Image (tube, rainbow, N blue to C red):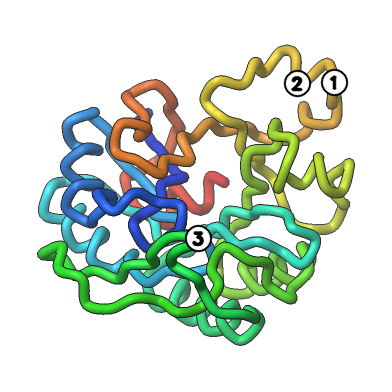
Amino acid sequence: MKIAVDLHIHSALSPCGHEDMTPNNIINMAWIKGLDAIAVTDHNSAGNVEPVMELGRDKGILVVPGMEVQSREEVHLLCYFPGISEVLDFQELIYDNLEGSNDPELFGEQLIMDREDRVTGTNSKLLIGSTGLTVSHICDETIRRGGRVVPAHVDRKAFSIISNLGFIPPGLGVATVEITKKAVLEELLIQFSFLSEYRIIRSSDAHSLEDIMEREFFIEVDQLEIINIVDSL
């Protein structure tokens, strides 16, 4: 089946995410925009994934548990997992390799919420920073937990695997890359011909509700299940 997806959405847990990116608002906006599946991919944390998944089930929207990890090389990697236990286990690894504390006045609040959109706490870690893990290590640990890694917004001039490394190293187990929704694919393929070897997805990287995608990017899956989406990547 062909499903409409947006696999790169930040909640209010991300320091750069708007405070209105609550679990209910994310799901309701995804429903209004006609999406079949989304992924919550906060910076270096999965603290708000579970309530969004629960609300998604109530609304008929599949939510893939994920995280946007910043590697030691300052590369953003989208890590997707088959279930909540796997992403929370991965979160422990990420937390163990993060240094520094968040400054809310400088970077923004990092809000943890429940399914009623109540703020249950804040994350004091420097989620906007880099982990001490390399790109290779992050890929290995994600795959070991049954997940898949998609290098994020490879068309951007900052925090992308191409801008920071200049290429996609072989042996990472990466089969898919993400481009921004306004990227011109034909121009990218001329500039970086090696991208033709990868599956390419478009996502919003939404930090505000209005940025969540409409029914504008589709993927083919056998069933509307998390594992089918993860495997397709």
Above or below residue 170? Residue 95 is below
Left or right of 164? Residue 20 is left
Assign a secondary structure to mark 1: helix
**Type of amino acid at the residue the image marks with label 2:** Leu
* Residue 191 numbered tag: 1
User: In the depicted view, which residue is nearer to us: 143 or 22?
Assistant: 22
- Looking at the rendering, which quadrant does residue 144 occupy? bottom right
Would you name the residue on which mark 3 appears? 107
Q: Crowding near pointer 2: few (<14 within 10 Å), some, many (20+)?
A: some
Q: Is residue 76 above or below residue 34?
A: below
- Which residue, given by chain and number where applicable, does mark 2 sit on? 188
Answer with left or right where residue 52 lies relative to residue 170.
Answer: left
Q: Between marks 3 and 1, how big is the CA–CA gap? A: 34 Å
The amino acid at mark 1 is Gln
Residue displayed at 10% across by 64% down: 116
Proximity of marks 1 and 2: CB atoms separated by less than 8 Å? yes
Please say whether residue 183 is visible from this viewpoint.
yes
Which residue sits at x=56%, y=81%?
Answer: 95
Indicate whether 52 appears above or below 46.
above
Check residue 7 in the rendering and tell me which mark sits there, or answer none: none
Asked if residue 1 can be seen in this view, the reply is no
Q: Earlier in the sequence, mark 3 or mark 1?
A: 3
The answer to whether 169 appears left or right of 211 in the picture is: right
Q: Secondary structure at mark 3?
A: helix
Q: Secondary structure at mark 2?
A: helix
Q: Are marks 2 and 3 in contact (CB under 8 Å)?
A: no
Image quadrant where residue 71 sits: bottom right
